[in-house]
Image (cartoon, helix red, strand yellow):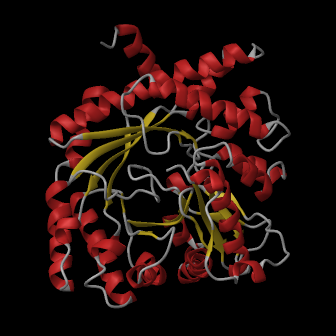
Amino acid sequence: MINIQEVQETNQMVKEENLDVRTITIGISLLSCIDSDLSRLKEKIYDRITRVAKDLSATAETIEKEFGIPIVNKRISCTPASIVGASACLDEEDFAEIAKTMDRAAAAVGVNLIGGYSALVSKGMTEADERLIRSLPQALSETERVCSSINVASSRTGINMDAVRLCGDTILAVAEASKDRDSADCMKLVIFCNAPDDNPFMAGAFHGVTEADAVINVGVSGPGVVKTALSRVRGESFEVLCETIKKTAFKVTRVGQAVAGEAARLLKIPFGIVDLSLAPTPAIGDSVADILCEIGLEYAGAPGTTAALALLNDQVKKGGVMASSYVGGLSGAFIPVSEDQGMIDAAAKGAITLEKLEAMTAVCSVGLDMIAIPGDTPSSSISGIIADEMAIGMVNHKTTAVRLIPAIGKKVGDTVEFGGLFGHAPVMSVNPYSCEAFVGRKGRIPAPIHSFKN
């Protein structure tokens, strides 16, 4: 049972510390929609999404009023489109039609974003996978809500360097197609290693093939809550610091568990997981970087940053798993640059670099996220950055990801503006030396020896 003190604490978190439920996400299997006729496939996809998710927005509003907790986004994740469209989509334009259908369905039910325009290619690409990836510039520029993820590596299979190279080319093409909007479509595309099947956060959400027909996943976020709690124990020992983070993460996850349970009950859809990820926003006081400063750093990126982030991520997970039987997704600390005012300030000061961010991804929950780079960065360098990040995930058996925005026409020191939750970001420098001969090799980087566990 939740007692009155917990209720009062939660109310304070909402009013003063930016606590929110970042998303209620319905995962929807589209496997039953598969058809070799494109028109019938599109009709089935639209009907299934609108039927299953028709009450999501209204239910979220009901829960907001009942619990007094802001629910920032309502989202849908679907079975990877490269699987669903494999038999019907004969070219890139056919796959773009699938994206448009997903977009229309999302608009019809009033959700903010829909994920699952995705491909899983860690060991190899089918013709359908490649068509979907090549369709991304068109698909993302002609839709508003569709998000895409491509899983190019895993600890079990290694890194598919053919897919990495293709993704580098594709990211630049997506950037070019949206250059009149600061290459903003790149925000809707993320490249993964070890992508989880049950992630409610975009752009990486898709409904894994091991999941049920439909499931409710909730993502809850509270960087401001953690920062406020740590400000009360300033100067205390590491033991006190860790205990404070764990207790706070427990309370935040309890909120997510309550919301998830109520959403599952009202929608009559099984509860999946709560993802406790400290996902920042551009709002003042809602920053993971500010938590690192509260721990004792002048700016994120200062010496000690990776250790402080490792501590934070671990304690968040330890506190969260005690509050829910099903903690999943990513669950930990996100370090997106454009969405975190503290990170933006650190980048503007020169305190944090792309290389330091890469080091931090070894201990955070995702990876190189929402980072603007010069628009003239070669696609081979983008592929090299992806390969580096995939290697960190592969060797460490963790999820890592890359979401880069090559801002066409922008150079280091310029700023890109995205608005809303996506914020703004300074354009960061990329190492100028070439890796073209490396990423030009064909095939896979093998999985590490410790992946062989049978």
> At x 67% / y 74%, what residue is drawn?
383
> At x 58% / y 77%, what residue is drawn?
175
- In the picture shown, does residue 268 fall above or below 125? above
Q: Residue 292 sits in which quadrant?
A: top right
- In the picture shown, does residue 170 fall above or below 336? below
Q: Position of residue 16 (x, y in %)?
A: 51, 26
Left or right: 59 in relation to 440: left
Q: Residue 148 sits in which quadrant?
A: bottom left
Residue sitting at the far front: 454
Q: Position of residue 346 (x, y in %)?
A: 77, 47
- In the picture shown, does residue 242 fall above or below 353? above
> At x 35% / y 67%, what residue is drawn?
80
Q: Quadrant of the N terminus?
A: top left
In this rendered view, identify the residue nearer to me: 299 or 394: 394
Q: Position of residue 139 (x, y in %)?
A: 41, 79
Left or right: 344 in relation to 302: left
Residue 15 makes an appearance in the image: no
Residue 186 makes an appearance in the image: yes
Left or right: 416 in relation to 318: right
Total number of numbered labels?
0
In this rendered view, identify the residue nearer to me: 256 or 215: 215
Q: Position of residue 407 (x, y in %)?
A: 66, 73
> At x 64% / y 38%, what residue is drawn?
288
Left or right: 432 in relation to 168: right
